[in-house]
Amino acid sequence: MKQLKPKLLKLHRWVGLTLGILLFVQGLTGALLVFRDDIERVIHPSLVVEPMAARAPIQALMDTVEARHPDIPVNRAEFSDAADGAVLFKLVAKDGSRWLTAVDPYRNVVVRDGPMAVWPGEWIFYIHYGLLAGPAGHIVVGIEGLGLLFLAVTGPIVWWPGRKRLKQGLKVVTDRGADLKWRSLHRAVGAVAAIVLGASAFTGASMVWKDEFRAVLRLATTVTDKPSPKVAERPDATMVPLDRLVAHAQADYGATALRQIRFSSGGRVAAVYLDSDLTIRADGTKQVFYNRYDGSDVGHYVAGALPVGTEIVDWLFPLHTGLFGGTVTRLLAVTFGLVLAGLSASGLWLWYSRTSRKRKRKPALAAAMAENA
């Protein structure tokens, strides 16, 4: 092990140096996203509306958005779990650009409207999700996850001082210069946080390569895919109102709260997302897919009634974001996001400090050799 440690330390440093800035961004944006919905209600007061006795029909809200943006298809509608929350419609243009429109669900009026750039929470999400670089950025984020997993595994191995010196290994030296202070702090915090950061890295990378993760799980258990029904275009046909589809879903699958409606197959399929009362998973939903022309059920995906392998895949997101345990685990997710940002920044600083010292020593060493020649 003593012979292995120097090699692991060198690899640890180079992986950390290569990914340092990206991991800093991931840690900081991840911490900000944990309470994204709560923060957006503060920075966008218009998202908080005055409740009334009755809500406007969902189809009427959809019509308002489509009339405002006739050339940008609606990708999904998100319904707040708060009575005073606006409904957020997310639109995606053919060129991939995104637009968000918030509508008062009682008065059916647009309360906030604009491209992704004026929605900080959405902008930060897509930085964290794919560095605003589309599929290529998503892959880079996955590579970051694997790199962080490597750092989380090798860091404690390199740091391990032995059981008898464990207390000393966790001590932060503050009275022998900035370099040693930050180095000892980096090592101690990294050792303590390694398990959680490793879990975050694994779940993040697994979400990037979810299909590959499913394939591995299929070697041991049953894993089903989410339905992706297609409906052919019928130019002269009218579509069933969204309210009727929601009522149909609640009648057939249980009258739980509506969370989202997502659109696919050119807007001809509507997936109604209801809270699932069959699972303890915080983001668990009953997803029912409908043909919007005739209202027929063309697929479903119900959390709590899925094979074990599928449930494992769906647990990746709440584990990664801290949703699984409520406010306490979400606060921990914020803490460890900031820890990752701090470790990345301190690692880069330590590399800079070390290389600076080497550069300064070279002229002095050359002068001493010349003097002794």
Image (cartoon, grey):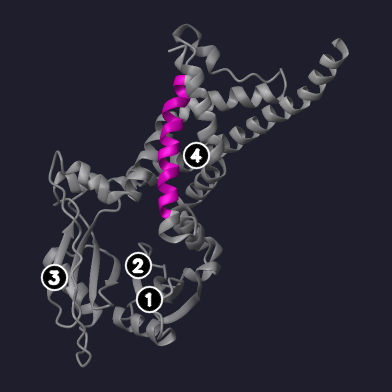
The answer to whether marks 3 and 4 mark residues whose Cβ atoms lie closer than 8 Å is no
Residue at the right extreme of this rendering: 371
Vertical placement of 32 versus 103: above or below? above
How far apart marks 2 and 3 lie (CA) works out to: 23 Å
Look at the numbered discs 4 and 2 and tell me whether their residues touch, using CB distance below 8 Å. no
For the point 57% across and 27% down, which residue is it?
186
Looking at the image, which residue sits at the far top?
164
Which of the two marks, 4 or 1, is nearer to us in this view? Answer: 4
Task: Classify residue 65 by image quadrant.
Answer: bottom left
Q: Look at mark 1 in the image and give the residue it sits on.
A: 105
Mark 2 or 1, closer to the camera: 2
Between 133 and 265, the one lying in front of the other is 133
Marks 2/1: CA–CA distance:
9 Å
Say what amino acid the circle numbered 1 marks: Pro
Q: CA distance from mark 3 to mark 4?
A: 42 Å
Q: Which residues are magenta?
A: 138-157
Inspect the image, locate mark 3, and give the three-letter code of the amino acid beneath it.
Answer: Val
Question: Mark 3 highlights which residue?
Answer: 298
Asked which secondary structure carries label 4, the reply is helix
Residue type, mark 4 in image? Thr
According to the picture, the residue beneath numbered tag 2 turns out to be: 79
Q: Which mark sits nearer the N-terminus, 4 or 2?
A: 2
Find out whether the residues at labels 2 and 1 contact each other: C-beta distance under 8 Å: yes
Query: Nearer the N terminus, badge 2 or badge 1?
Result: 2
Residue 30, compared with residue 118, is above or below; it is: above
Q: Label for residue 335?
A: 4
First in residue order: circle 3 vs circle 4: 3
